[in-house]
Image (cartoon, helix red, strand yellow):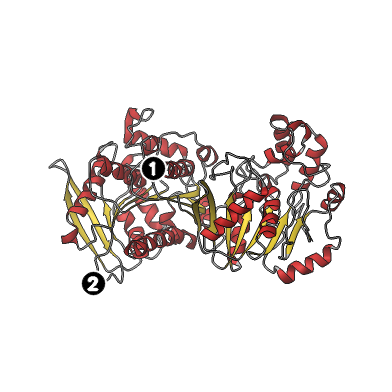
């Protein structure tokens, strides 16, 4: 699965890649362009620990490559155990497969030892190395990691970092509460002193950051073969020097000299702290436990927009439809010019059904070659929104992707519940493919797409095409789709209210679409419950602050597990319906930019 994670912290997205090495699937995440830097997290952390460092590196001319080491994240678990030498070999081979023969390395915690092994074993490949926090400062007698739990205080440290959202998020005075929970529930030692030490450290902005150290190898872990041959930067807090002495380590003893070396030889590798940037990680008012904020905030323009939203909504369905159209169009901003727009009426399966379709030809479309076609299903919870409300997004989507966008005016629930909206979208998909010659589009490059409820319909239409022997689909483009009726996922619990789309709104929409079948939905209504094998390649976009985020991410994972080449896009700082928000924030343009990059690169590659 090749994933792309769009971010508000950098101009480029983050591309998730899977590479098979020695029969093992290795997952890595790439961001930015420039000199490559391999980021190795501490076990059992994943690439996610480096997300803010990645953005900082990308902004400063590096290509950041964060990896899930074997046995963590989406990488496979090794059958024969784990050691720094074999891990280093696999990661070096990963970099070779990615086209990098020379690269920098940053390693954190146990990843530090793997990073040093890389520099030691492949001195011609590793140009520079940054090493961070190998042990808990002053809390352990020696870095003996693989020992019985009863003898190892490190295990609480590992458990402390197993959560996806690292504890650096918890900087609103609840660090002690969180640590106590972890100690009481998970650790093998109830060491209150250690809890106090870490609570104090994490509660202080930049608590463990600020000092740089040269870090020679420790022969007990991985004997150096020829020295690293690369500038090495280590990061630790003031207490780390004491901990290093207690562990019998030979660190350089002049922090100021090391800092000067780092500034000279590694001018853009800042001190790291648990995969986060000092001062960015530790921020007041940011607590997932209290729900008062998150590390990557909602886009500032969107936050201001949300604060202005009225507290009440129109009562009747007719009023809701009119108000929804008005509100969406008010967010659009200026419309992009396109080459031209055509309007069609497609006959449905029932002779009484006529489906309006609006086709957007991208600006500058070539007259010499047939452009790809995108059949697009709009959002609106299957029961709201008109073609007019999607004029602006479809223009931008056509121009960004180079596709002729066929916007489908499908019938709306509850007057026309499931499967009527799906039937209409699938019927237009077949119509575009069957009439591609007359329409002047490339039948071999037909994309099925949609946002929100339209993303659900697009996913289901792809399944229908597979099951009914329908037209071939080159790509699915699914934008923050609802793919299951479960309203208790992690993102529903976190973003149930206050982030534009609400849990109550989705409950209403599912009811309008499925009626009394919500609890036992048909698989074409809840694609997450379906067999997803043999579907066309997919791009799935989710917004960071969206109740639908968890199911969208789960859908991307299941697609990949079923053998479908899949791209996951998480728009940081965005909320649901951000395709409409170009007039609210420029950052909303990432949804079009990423769609354009992905589809254009796919079609260029396929034509080559």
Place of residue 471 in the rendered image (x, y in percent of width and height, measured from the top left)? 23, 49
Place of residue 277 in the rendered image (x, y in percent of width and height, measured from the top left)? 68, 57
Place of residue 419 in the rendered image (x, y in percent of width and height, measured from the top left)? 26, 37
* Residue 279 seen in render: no
Of helix, strand and loop, which one carries label 2? loop
In the rendered image, which residue does mark 2 sit on? 368
The number of discs equals: 2
Q: Kindly identify the residue that appears in the image at 84 percent across and 42 percent down.
A: 141
* Residue 119 seen in render: yes
Task: Specify the label residue 314 is tagged with.
Answer: 1
Q: Looking at the image, which residue sits at the far left? A: 351
Category of crowding for the residue at label 1, using alpha-carbon neighbours closer than 10 angstroms: few (below 14), some (14–19), many (at least 20): few
Category of crowding for the residue at label 2, using alpha-carbon neighbours closer than 10 angstroms: few (below 14), some (14–19), many (at least 20): few
Residue 292 placement: quadrant: top right
| N-term mark: 2 or 1 | 1
Task: Specify the label residue 206 is tagged with.
Answer: none
Of helix, strand and loop, which one carries label 1? loop
Q: Is residue 28 left or right of residue 429?
A: right
Above/below status of 599 relative to 312: below
Above/below status of 96 relative to 171: below
Above/below status of 421 relative to 34: above
Place of residue 256 in the rendered image (x, y in percent of width and height, measured from the top left)? 83, 65
> Considering depth in this image, is 507 or 78 the residue closer to the camera?
78
Q: Is residue 61 left or right of residue 592?
A: right
Q: Kindly identify the residue that appears in the image at 70 percent across and 48 percent down.
A: 110
> Considering depth in this image, is 220 or 394 the residue closer to the camera?
220
- Distance between mark 2 and mark 1 Cα atoms: 49 Å
């Amino acid at each position: 699965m090749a994933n792309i994670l769009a971010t508000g912290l950098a101009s480029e997205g983050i591309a998730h890649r899977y590479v098979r090495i020695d029969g093992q699937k290795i997952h890595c995440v790439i961001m930015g362009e420039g000199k490559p830097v391999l980021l190795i997290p501490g076990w059992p952390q994943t690439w996610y620990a480096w997300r803010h460092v990645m953005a900082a590196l990308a902004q400063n001319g590096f290509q950041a490559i964060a990896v899930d080491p074997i046995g963590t994240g989406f990488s496979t678990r090794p059958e024969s155990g784990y050691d720094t030498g074999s891990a280093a070999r696999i990661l070096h081979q990963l970099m070779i497969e990615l086209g990098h023969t020379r690269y920098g390395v940053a390693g954190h915690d146990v990843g530090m030892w793997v990073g040093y092994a890389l520099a030691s074993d492949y001195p011609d490949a590793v140009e520079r190395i940054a090493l961070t926090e190998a042990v808990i400062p002053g809390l352990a007698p020696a870095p003996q990691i693989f020992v019985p739990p009863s003898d190892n205080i490190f295990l609480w440290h590992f458990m402390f970092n197993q959560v996806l959202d690292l504890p650096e998020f918890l900087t609103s005075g609840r660090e002690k509460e969180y640590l106590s929970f972890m100690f009481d529930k998970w650790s093998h030692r109830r060491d209150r002193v250690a809890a106090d030490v870490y609570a104090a450290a994490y509660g202080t902005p930049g608590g463990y950051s600020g000092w740089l150290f040269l870090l020679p190898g420790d022969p007990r872990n991985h004997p150096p073969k020829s020295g690293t041959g690369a500038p090495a930067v280590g990061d630790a807090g003031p207490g780390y020097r004491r901990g290093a002495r207690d562990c019998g380590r030979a660190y350089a003893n002049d922090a100021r000299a090391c800092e000067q070396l780092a500034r000279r030889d590694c001018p853009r590798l800042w001190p790291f702290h648990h995969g986060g940037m000092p001062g960015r990680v530790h921020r007041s008012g940011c607590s997932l436990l209290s729900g008062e904020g998150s590390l990557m905030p909602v886009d500032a323009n969107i936050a201001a927009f949300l604060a202005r939203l009225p507290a009440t909504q129109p009562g009747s369905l007719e009023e809701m439809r009119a108000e929804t159209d008005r509100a969406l169009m008010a967010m659009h901003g200026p419309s992009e010019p396109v080459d031209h727009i055509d309007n069609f009426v497609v006959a449905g399966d029932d002779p009484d059904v006529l489906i309006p379709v609006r086709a957007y030809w991208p600006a500058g479309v070539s007259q010499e070659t047939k452009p790809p076609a995108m059949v697009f299903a709009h959002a609106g919870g299957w029961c709201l929104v008109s073609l007019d409300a999607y004029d602006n997004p479809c223009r931008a989507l056509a121009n960004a992707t180079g596709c002729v966008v066929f916007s489908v005016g499908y019938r709306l629930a509850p007057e026309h519940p499931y499967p009527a909206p799906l039937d209409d979208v699938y019927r237009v998909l077949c119509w575009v493919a069957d009439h591609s010659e007359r329409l002047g589009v490339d039948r071999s490059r037909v994309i099925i797409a949609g946002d929100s409820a339209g993303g659900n319909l697009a996913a289901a239409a792809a399944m229908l095409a597979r099951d009914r022997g329908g037209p071939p689909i080159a790509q699915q483009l699914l934008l923050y789709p609802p793919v299951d009726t479960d309203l208790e996922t992690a993102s529903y619990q976190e973003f149930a209210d206050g982030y534009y789309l609400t849990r109550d709104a989705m409950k209403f929409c599912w009811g309008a679409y499925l009626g009394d079948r919500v609890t036992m939905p048909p698989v074409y209504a809840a694609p997450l419950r379906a067999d997803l094998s043999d579907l066309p390649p997919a791009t799935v976009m989710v917004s960071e602050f969206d109740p639908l985020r968890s199911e969208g991410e789960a859908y991307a994972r299941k697609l990949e597990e079923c053998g479908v080449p899949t791209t996951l896009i998480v728009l940081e700082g965005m909320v649901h319906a951000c395709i409409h928000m170009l007039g609210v924030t420029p950052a909303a343009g990432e949804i079009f930019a990423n769609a354009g990059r992905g589809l254009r690169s796919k079609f260029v590659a396929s034509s080559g």
